Image (cartoon, rainbow, N blue to C red):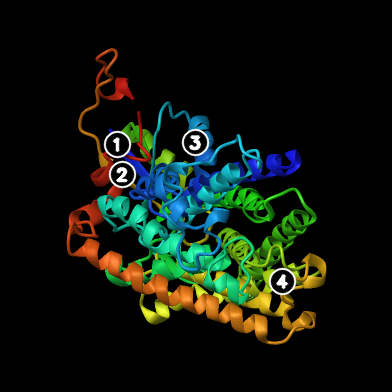
Amino acid sequence: MKLITTIIKPFKLDDVKAALKDAGVQGITVTEVQGFGRQAGHTEVYRGTEYTIDFVPKVKLEVLADDADADRIIGVIVETARTGKIGDGKVWVTDAGHIVRIRTGELDSDAI
Amino acid sequence: MDTGDAAWVMVSAALVLFMTPGLALFYGGMDRTKNVLNMLMMNFWCLLIVPVVWVVVGYSLSGQNPADFDNKFLGSLDFIGLKGMGIGGEDGGALLITMVFLGMFAVITPALISGAVADRMKFSAWAIFVPVWLLLVFVPVFKWVYGGWLGSRGSQDFAGGTAIHVNAGIAALAMVLVIGKRKGWPQEGHPPHNMPMVMLGTGILWFGWFGFNAGSALGASGTAIQAFLNTFVAAAAAGLAWAVTEKLRDGHFTNLGAASGIVAGLVAITPGAGFVSGMSPLYIGLIAGVVCCFAVGLKTKFGYDDALDVVGVHMVGGLVGSLLIGFFSSPDYFGTENKAGLFEGGGLGLLGEQALANGATLIYSFVVTTLIALALKHTIGIRVDDETEQNGLDLAEHAETAYHGTN
């Protein structure tokens, strides 16, 4: 099993969610996060004074998938979340060693 | 007292009361999440302590009872606890409602100073500062301007440009010079945490300011109508001027620029609200908007940490408005007891009196406020410790949190 983690632009969340549902994904976890990458932050001006806001708001999405489905799901995310402009985010994959569905006690692939 | 006059002064007093919560939101929104409740409480403290001090002794010392009109520097102790004042006499309570109306001004004047000392003043020091400053600075200056030596010489201040805004603004400067800079300022930014709160506070201030200015006619008269109109026009003109100045200088029309301009215009029209007419309020507003927009930059240039720009908006705006009376005052319209400004057929006389009145206020308020601040600093302490400043004053000083994440 794989844990697919992705950071995307917040306005792309609805599109990515819909695309993942269409691709058969049954559940995702979403967190509002902030950070910086190559896009860096931005400046705001209050009463003539510039303030540098270092961290940009982003959305973090986590999806559990079977090994066989992982590449397809990553493809869906990359295709849907891409704008071509700086700050589109990243996707990375880690091994999920063991999964348990809390309600039923089902294990691993059955718990996805 | 005429029933219409009585009704208008009562409504105006309530409008002015509403300004202090409005100011609290205006300042609170500009403050940070961890200090917003401390800012609100500094303002609400004025609503708790000042009315009490005012009826017990402040009003009597302010010399606004006709029996004290001959005094030129301070009132008397004859009206402590409102002695002898009631609704039974010939005036039908006119003195009482005037006392309440003036008490509202006494509430908001020290509250104005809170914006300068934001994020770092011990609340216990603020709690003592407010009544002490009220009696040692606000009350005497109020007397000098209204019926005292400055007013008698011929300076004019319709609703408190000198007595309130210049007075509080220079006191704010004195306070921040003693209390010092916020940690990290100016290298680290402290941007506003809630701009919608600032805009709501601005709206409340503008609304309440109709009572502040038009109510200062102390009756439902033509002068009140002119002051009402001037309050309407000058605030809009100053907001427009500030917003456009920022657009040209920095590239955007900003909410905070609009809000700051509106408040600067309200401050600037306060001293002349009942003395100017025609397009004069428009000019006063436009000038104040541009001047104050640049004046808020002085703190970084000179290195005094006036956190929320009390000096740049209230002291500078008050001075601009008060000095402009020397140009725009039109006695033909409001009665010959007032002097004419330079543009209305008068000479330089009125401008000179305005300069003197503001100069005396600046010096007295700065010196006495500095002494009060130093006395607090060397007794109970005036500044919170580093840890409290870092973690925020809300939790340490009030055991409250403005925004809980979940639950």
Vertical placement of residue B204 versus A66, above or below:
below
Instruction: Give how far apart the Cα atoms at labels 4 and 2 are.
Output: 80 Å
Task: Mark 4 and mark 1 in contact? Answer it, CB < 8 Å.
Answer: no
Left or right of B24 in this view: B92: right
Judge if badges 4 and 1 mark residues of a common chain: no
Q: Which is more foreground, mark 4 or mark 3? A: 4
What residue type is disc 4 on?
Asn
Q: CA distance from mark 3 to mark 2?
A: 18 Å
Label 2: chain letter: A
Q: Measured from the top left, where is residue B369 in percent x and y?
A: 35, 67
To which residue does mark 1 refer?
A2
Dot 3 or dot 2, earlier in sequence: 3
Task: Give me the C-alpha separation between circle 1 and circle 2.
Answer: 6 Å
Q: Residues within 10 Å of mark 4 (few under 14, many from 20)?
A: some
The residue furthest bottom is B348
Residue under pointer 4 = B338
The location of residue B283, given as percent across then percent down, is 73, 73
Residues beneath discs 3 and 2 located on the same chain: yes
Whole-angstrom CA distance, mark 3 to mark 1, is: 18 Å
- Judged from the image, the secondary structure of the residue bearing numbered disc 1 is strand
Mark 1 is on which residue type?
A: Lys
Residue visible at 72% across and 87% down in the picture:
B347
Label whose residue precedes the other's in the sequence (1 or 2): 1
Q: Residue at x 52, y 58 (%)?
A: B68
**Residue B64 placement (x, y as % from top left):** 54, 56
Give residue B90's quadrant in the image. top right
- Please, what secondary structure does the residue beneath circle 4 have? loop
- Identify the disc placed on residue A77: none
Identity, as a three-letter code, of the amino acid under mark 2: Val
Instruction: Kindly indicate whether the residues beneath marks 4 and 2 are on one polypeptide chain.
Output: no
Which residue position is annotated with label 3?
A17
